[in-house]
Amino acid sequence: MIKIRGQRVPVRELSPEQRIKNFSSVPLGYSAEEAVAEARRCIQCRGAPCEVNCPIHLRVLDMIRAIATRQFKEAFFLLKEDNPIPAITGRVCPQESQCEGVCPLAQDGQGINIGKLEAFIADWARERGIKEEIVIKERPHRVAIIGSGPAGLICAYDLRRWGYQVTVFEALHKAGGVLQYGIPAFRLPTEVVDYEIALLEEIGVNFQLNFFVGQNIAFDELRHKYEAIFIGTGAGAPLFLGIEGEHLKGVYSANEFLIRVNLMKAYRFLEYDTPIVCGDRAGVIGAGNVAMDAARCARRLGAREVFILYRRTRKESPARVEEIHHALEEGVTWMELVAPKRILGDEQGWVRGIELVRMKLGEPDASGRPRPIPIEGSEFVLELDTVVEALGTTPNRLFLKHAPELAVNRWGLIQVDEKLQTNLKGVWAGGDAVRGNATVILALGDGRQAAAAIHRVLSPEKLG
Ligand SMILES: Cc1cc2nc3c(=O)[nH]c(=O)nc-3n(C[C@H](O)[C@H](O)[C@H](O)COP(=O)(O)OP(=O)(O)OC[C@H]3O[C@@H](n4cnc5c(N)ncnc54)[C@H](O)[C@@H]3O)c2cc1C
């Protein structure tokens, strides 16, 4: 029996025992009845804080109203107008700090489950083959997009809808950026990402995979061949601690670990070529979404004990609440207020443990979070055979080396003006390449804004 208001309609999920044996989606999503019941809890409040607080100002209230009255098709078209990849954002956006966090019903922790409603509608349409009808009036201008993450994908989608000849260059063998290689299938099923990309191909976006701009083609040559370029190359180069023992076998950056698992399907080794070695006791350094993903993958790869090693406390963790909750349910141990000093190995060069120092929290630092301070003499050793460092990433310097005239700041982030134009004529940039580690929805917002700016420059006559 489903309640109409009051409590959130719960989302069915795989049990922790079932899910740690596979990479299947953990949330099973709403049924139509559940989605309608959840949508009917919405009070359609004035001012729509959920829309105001959404980086792309999705028309949430209209979508919810349509679901509440079972007009799923209308809800889908409305959603797609604002956001070309709702099946993805519905699953991975940090809703608790955006739309859901400001819902008036959230005060008692029962805000409308906007993310799951968004995913429900997108899945409902996908399962029925319902697509937008896009009529394209061709334009001759050629636009190149470098990188096929969410920023590049939305930029390609908008420009193609407006008739431009769009080619997306992607260094990896599959398009999607972090959606494909970073976020595991138990959070974002591969078929969902593949479907969205296939839709882009259907409307005529050309994808050049295994194609690294800067190496397969010089950046300058690309500039000569295309009238506009959008750079959405992300921030895929891992940061390391720089401590003793990082060279040991069994130490991974989260990037390598997740790419092996997600993109190269290392958990199906023999069937797929890429192996991965994950032992019995894995430690993941960091506490963001990437760390949760790595920890949850380690459990699925058979590690009996997995530790999140974090120098602050759970309250300061930047990970999505749902990810922390799922990781804990899956048996991941949260070890807070500890910082690594060195990684210890055996004579064969394999990881055997990590030396940690206990921390306490001090005054807020530049990030606004309390500064972790080491407690002298509190060092101890935790036995581990796998260590994954999830400390954040920076832009890949390889591309920047091949585009030396592009203005970047000291962290290698591409500098842009308020319209996302770089210092180079005809070149725009957005997403993590400009912001550093951010979110899918912010990358989407950038890609969309850059597409509009490119459109304005290439077709000024259409805009009056
Ligand atoms: C493991 C993980 C989990 C995350 N979880 C979440 C989450 O739950 N929610 C959320 O909102 N955000 C999450 N994020 C962050 C989010 O995924 C990123 O902010 C977002 O993907 C950035 O999009 P982007 O398009 O800027 O770049 P990316 O997604 O990084 O894509 C950039 C693409 O450019 C390609 N590329 C780079 N250089 C070149 C070149 N020279 N030539 C051709 N191609 C090139 C790369 O191969 C890559 O495919 C997560 C990130 C990671 C790593």
Image (spheres, grey):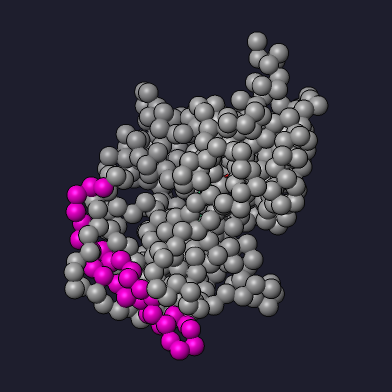
Residue at 69% over, 47% down: 213
Q: Is residue 346 left or right of residue 263?
A: left
Residue at 48% over, 30% down: 57
Q: Residue furthest top?
A: 464
Q: Is residue 13 left or right of residue 74?
A: left
Point out the image quarter for the C terminus.
top right
Residue at 45% over, 72% down: 246
Looking at the image, can residue 437 be seen?
yes
Image: 107 above or below 181: above
Q: Range of the magenta residues?
A: 337-365
Image: 47 above or below 193: above
Indicate whether residue 358 is drawn in magenta: yes
Q: Residue 206: x, y in percent?
A: 77, 42
Q: Residue 106: x, y in percent?
A: 32, 40
User: Nearest the camera: 413 or 73?
Assistant: 413
Magenta region's main secondary structure?
strand
Residue at 41% over, 65% down: 242
Q: Is residue 114 left or right of residue 159?
A: left
Q: Residue 204: x, y in percent?
A: 78, 38
Q: Residue furthest front?
A: 404
Looking at the image, can residue 195 be seen?
no
User: Nearest the camera: 34 or 143?
Assistant: 143
Indicate whether residue 119 is drawn in magenta: no
Q: Residue 165: x, y in percent?
A: 77, 33
How many marks the image carries: the answer is 0
